[in-house]
Amino acid sequence: MKRFKWMLTALIIATPLAVQASCETVKADINHKIINNGVPASGFSLEIVPNDQADQAGGQVVGHCENDTQKIVYKRSGSDSDASAPATTGTSQDAPSS
């Protein structure tokens, strides 16, 4: 009976931790979506930064992770004028109005 209680307690504690998406997984998903929208892999970069540094990162926030303590920032590289982040890419941004 004691063993069952310990296992149940461990399961209750571990479940929320397993549900939170890891930053690398979210970053990989966003990377894949951007490439599928026609942006070359060499035309952008994604960076994981703490929330308080997202404004200084110099890009567009396209996602968040680790219980919203980290942001994923999209930056264009090169001079490709069509290398823009699609509005539906991230998990924390609404689509811009046109």
Image (cartoon, grey):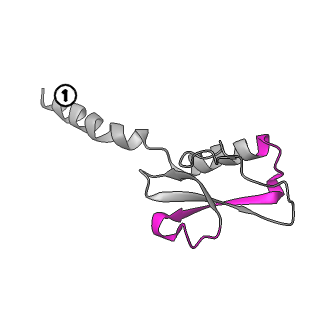
Is 52 part of what is drawn in magenta?
A: yes
Image quadrant holding the N terminus, namely top left
Residue 49 relative to residue 66: left or right: right
Q: Which residue is mark 1?
A: 4
Most extreme residue toward the front, as rendered?
98
Tell me the quarter of the picture where residue 88 sits.
top right
Image coords of residue 46 (percent x, y): 67, 58
The residue sitting at 60% across, 70% down in the picture is 57
Image coords of residue 61 (percent x, y): 59, 57
Most extreme residue toward the left, as rendered?
1
Amino acid at dot 1? Phe
Image coords of residue 49 (percent x, y): 54, 65
- SS type, badge 1: helix
The residue sitting at 33% across, 40% down in the picture is 14
Image coords of residue 63 (percent x, y): 56, 51
Is 49 part of what is drawn in magenta?
A: yes
The residue sitting at 72% across, 52% down in the picture is 85
Residue nearer the viewer, 18 or 40? 40
- Is 41 placed above or below 51 here? above
Q: Which residues are magenta?
A: 35-58
Tell me the quarter of the picture where residue 12 sits.
top left
- Is 75 placed above or below 8 here? below
